[in-house]
């Protein structure tokens, strides 16, 4: 087991620092989306190539390196692994501003993905150690606010800097800011005291053998993957859909997308964690049912929003699914934490994230870009809009898988040890 020797004030500080780092994780990841038009014109790239920059580089390194880095974190210091990861992905983000062609930018995005691989799973494990079961889903949801906040910041900050200087300086600015935060994080975020002699020593094979034998793990992992395939693809390409279909400029597009991501995403992520803690106590299966209901509402509203005739109606219709499509983060991540004993949490989370990211992050933006290029001869500049409609339907697949996970999750759940 792991014990926390510091007070609740320090616990909240640790959560705030982890949230800040996660915000930069998504700021560095999603800033590319708002800059796509400028980069495409400057470097003469196709939508398929741009889609690869938003998915394949991350999937190759982010997913494959997450497991060994999580094992390292379980066996050594999770806070040091997170700080080191922040340095790596921030440095490569800054290097993206120096790219002069597709392959240079591709390699630098590989570096960003390699760095970000060491951030999330160790953070999940730290939060699980600092927060008791009844508050854990809410804490994980607060941490997951880094997704909407970071994504919105990437859109707004990237557009502002690009509009006043150029797209290269946007990468320089956010990369350097991450490098400044890394030593502060390392000096202030400490490991909880680990009292069990076996803590952090379980081999990967032992952890994976446990989760692989639990049907709920696979159903939740593939449900999250289908959601992430749609979510990452839409997050990357939605600014271009808005610009191409409604004729909005860079600044107006950033306000449109930034407000959706920040307001809708924040409400959805935190609401999911809060609801999961309340309804999950009586029935563990509700940790999977809650995301399923959210995805059932998400798919048709995304389709209606992207097909709207005006940007105002589109914003109103897209607001709700932008809240609901990431509501799963608190409930499902909490559930995965409870499929294994405490000292295996980072590795179990990394196994879950590997499946989620290799499919969702690896295919989402590339698939949408590929569909756009294929549809362009028939639909012209509206091809990207119809690609978004098709991609939104993956939320329905996620819904079915999550509903199926609810029943086995009840028997697969591992309760906290009582000491």
Image: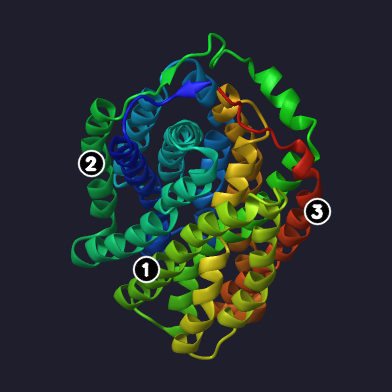
User: Which mark is on residue 75?
Assistant: none
Q: Residue farthest to the top?
A: 197
User: Which mark is on residue 404?
Assistant: 3
Q: Which residue is mark 2?
A: 176
From mark 3 to mark 2, how far is it between C-alphas?
Answer: 44 Å
Q: Quadrant of the C terminus?
A: top right
**Which is more N-terminal, label 3 or label 1?**
1
Task: Classify mark 2: residues with Cα within 10 Å, few (<14), some (14-19) or many (20+).
Answer: some
Mark 3 touching mark 2, by CB under 8 A?
no
At a point 67% along the width and 77% down the height, the residue shown is 300
From mark 2 to mark 1, how far is it between C-alphas?
Answer: 22 Å
Q: Is residue 310 above or below residue 410?
A: below
Q: Which residue is mark 1?
A: 258
Task: Classify mark 1: residues with Cα within 10 Å, few (<14), some (14-19) or many (20+).
Answer: many
Residue situated in front as seen by the camera: 109 or 135: 135
Residue 237, how many percent across, how many down? 50, 65
Q: Is residue 370 left or right of residue 266?
A: right
Q: Is residue 135 left or right of residue 257?
A: right
Residue 36, how many percent across, how many down? 41, 61
- Element carrying mark 1: helix
């Amino acid at each position: 087991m792991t014990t926390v020797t510091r007070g609740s004030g320090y616990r909240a500080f640790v959560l705030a620092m982890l949230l800040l780092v996660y915000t930069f994780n998504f700021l560095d990841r999603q800033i590319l989306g708002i800059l796509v038009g400028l980069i495409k014109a400057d470097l003469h790239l196709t939508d398929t190539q741009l889609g690869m920059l938003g998915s394949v580089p991350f999937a190759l390194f982010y997913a494959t390196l997450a497991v060994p880095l999580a094992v390292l974190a379980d066996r050594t210091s999770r806070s040091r692994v997170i700080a080191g990861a922040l340095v790596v992905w921030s440095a490569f983000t800054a290097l993206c501003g120096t790219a002069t062609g597709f392959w240079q930018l591709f390699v630098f995005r590989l570096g960003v993905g390699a760095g970000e691989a060491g951030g999330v799973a160790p953070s999940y494990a730290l939060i699980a150690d600092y927060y008791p079961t009844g508050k854990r889903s809410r804490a994980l949801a607060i941490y997951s606010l880094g997704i909407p906040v970071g994504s919105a910041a990437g859109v707004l900050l990237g557009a502002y800097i690009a509009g006043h200087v150029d797209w290269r300086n946007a990468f320089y600015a956010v990369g350097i800011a991450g490098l400044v935060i890394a030593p502060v994080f390392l000096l202030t975020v400490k490991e909880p005291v680990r009292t069990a002699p076996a803590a952090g020593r379980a081999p990967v094979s032992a952890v994976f053998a446990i989760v692989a034998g639990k049907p709920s793990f696979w159903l939740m992992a593939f449900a999250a993957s289908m959601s992430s395939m749609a979510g990452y693809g839409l997050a990357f390409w939605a600014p271009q859909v808005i610009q191409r279909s409604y004729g909005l400029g860079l600044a107006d597009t950033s306000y449109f997308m930034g407000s959706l991501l920040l307001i809708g995403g924040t409400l959805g992520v935190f609401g999911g964690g809060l609801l999961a803690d309340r309804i999950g106590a009586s029935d563990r299966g509700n940790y999977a049912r809650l995301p399923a209901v959210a995805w059932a509402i998400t798919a048709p509203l995304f389709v209606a929003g992207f097909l709207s005739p005006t940007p105002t109606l589109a914003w109103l219709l897209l607001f709700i699914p932008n809240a609901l499509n990431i509501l799963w983060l608190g409930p499902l991540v909490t559930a995965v934490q409870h499929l294994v004993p405490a000292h295996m949490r980072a590795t179990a989370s990394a196994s879950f994230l590997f499946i989620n990211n290799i499919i969702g992050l690896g295919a989402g933006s590339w698939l949408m870009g590929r569909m756009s290029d294929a549809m362009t001869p028939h639909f012209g500049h509206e091809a990207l809009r119809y690609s978004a409609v098709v991609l939104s339907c993956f939320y329905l697949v996620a819904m079915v898988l999550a509903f199926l996970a609810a029943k086995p999750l009840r028997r697969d759940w591992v309760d906290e040890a009582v000491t």
